[in-house]
Amino acid sequence: MLTPEQFAAIQKANVETLFGLTTKAFEGIEKLVELNLTASKAALSEAAETTQSLLGVKDAQELLALQAALFQPLAEKTAAYSRHLYDIGSSTGAEFGRALEGQVAEAQQKFLSVVDNAAKNAPAGSETAVAVFKSAVAAGNNALESVQKAVKQAADVAEANFNAVASQAVTASKGAKAKRASA
């Protein structure tokens, strides 16, 4: 049975966790807003430069060359933007994951403490039932750890795939630019 002091301490810890996660969420949003503002400013500046370049075009060949020159940096910038966006999302998600893992570990520890306390106070002859219960709890903990490992591995694979796709996109756009330049 929880004492009022223990219950208050648990509630206080939960509120602190909630505010900590809220702070991390706002930090992620701030980074996202900053990224979008920076990208918007750069896009506006580049649009002005492109417009000036287009106004200075004298013939169709120069227009085609200008158009070809615009696509390669666009692919690189899109890949960089996507990478920053992914980094913000994954770092914010990692913060939430660490907080969740900490909460789960703490809850498991408290639960095991309650089980141990109950086992000490169990009537004589219930040792087998207590051992079965403890075994079930251990199996549940092992299953949870396996799921956590699988989720981390899936996140690592997703990140590797994202990096590979972004790298291929930039390489393809550079290759296309090189072909146009040699033609």
Image (cartoon, rainbow, N blue to C red):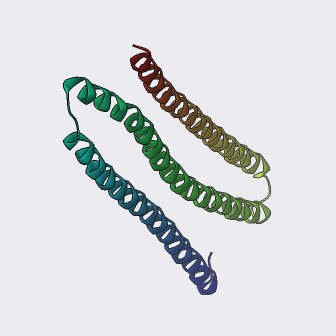
Identified at 20% across, 33% down, the residue is 58
Q: Is residue 149 above or below residue 121?
A: above
Q: Is residue 178 above or below residue 56?
A: above
Q: Is residue 9 above or below residue 110?
A: below
Residue at far bottom of view: 5
Quadrant of the image occupied by residue 14:
bottom right
Q: Is residue 152 above or below residue 84?
A: above
Q: Position of residue 91 (x, y in %)?
A: 55, 54
Identified at 79% across, 52% down, the residue is 125
Q: Position of residue 47 (x, y in %)?
A: 27, 49
Identified at 28% across, 31% down, the residue is 67
The foreground one among 140 and 121 is 140
Q: Quadrant of the C terminus?
A: top left
Identified at 73% across, 49% down, the residue is 134
Q: Position of residue 153 (x, y in %)?
A: 62, 35
Image side of residue 129 versus residue 176, left or right: right
Q: Quadrant of the N terminus?
A: bottom right
